[in-house]
Image (cartoon, helix red, strand yellow):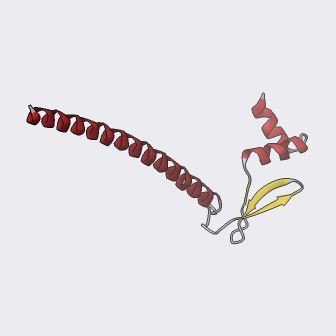
């Protein structure tokens, strides 16, 4: 009878150990997934930032400048000027009668 009790105790101990291993395995997987997600987001943000600061024409680093409240990126090497959509629309709104305003006004219709 004593050996039967010992075997039952061992089985209960093994079952408890198995549940504990499952719990920690699940928790570790969740933590690793969260860490991977954060790292992937950081890498994506770094790549986006790096890509924004390189001239698509010559590959030089762009410098950001603000002219009359409009942010633009200028290439010191080739002299290219790069605007995002919001900056271009802001310029078009200011110059409604000019070619830029007419260009964006025609697209809005």
Taking depth in this image into account, of 56 and 62 the one nearest to the observer is 62
Figure quadrant of the N terminus: top left
Q: Is residue 95 visible?
A: no
How many circles with numbers are drawn on the protein? 0
Figure quadrant of the C terminus: top right
Taking depth in this image into account, of 99 and 26 the one nearest to the observer is 26
Residue at 27% x, 41% y: name it: 17
Taking depth in this image into account, of 105 and 14 the one nearest to the observer is 14
Q: Is residue 53 left or right of residue 83?
A: left
Image position, residue 26 (x, y; %): 37, 40
Image position, residue 24 (x, y; %): 37, 43
Residue at 72% x, 49% y: name it: 84
Q: Is residue 8 visible?
A: yes
Residue 52: quadrant of the picture: bottom right
Residue 11: quadrant of the picture: top left
Q: Is residue 3 left or right of residue 41?
A: left
Residue 90: quadrant of the picture: top right
Residue situated furthest bottom in the rendering:
77
108 in relation to 40, above or below: above
Residue at 13% x, 36% y: name it: 7
Residue situated furthest front in the rendering:
2
Residue situated furthest top in the rendering:
109
Image position, residue 80 (x, y; %): 71, 63
Q: Is residue 35 left or right of residue 102?
A: left
Q: Is residue 37 left or right of residue 107?
A: left
């Amino acid at each position: 009878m004593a050996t039967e009790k010992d075997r039952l105790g061992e089985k209960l101990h093994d079952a408890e150990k198995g549940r504990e291993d499952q719990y920690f395995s699940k928790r570790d997987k969740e933590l690793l997934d969260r860490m991977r997600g954060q790292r992937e987001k950081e890498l994506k943000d770094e790549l986006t930032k790096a890509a924004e600061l390189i001239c698509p024409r010559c590959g030089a680093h762009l410098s950001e400048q603000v002219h009359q409240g409009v942010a633009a990126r200028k290439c010191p090497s080739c002299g290219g000027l790069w605007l995002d959509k919001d900056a271009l629309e802001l310029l078009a709104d200011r110059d409604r009668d000019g070619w830029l305003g007419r260009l964006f006004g025609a697209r809005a219709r």
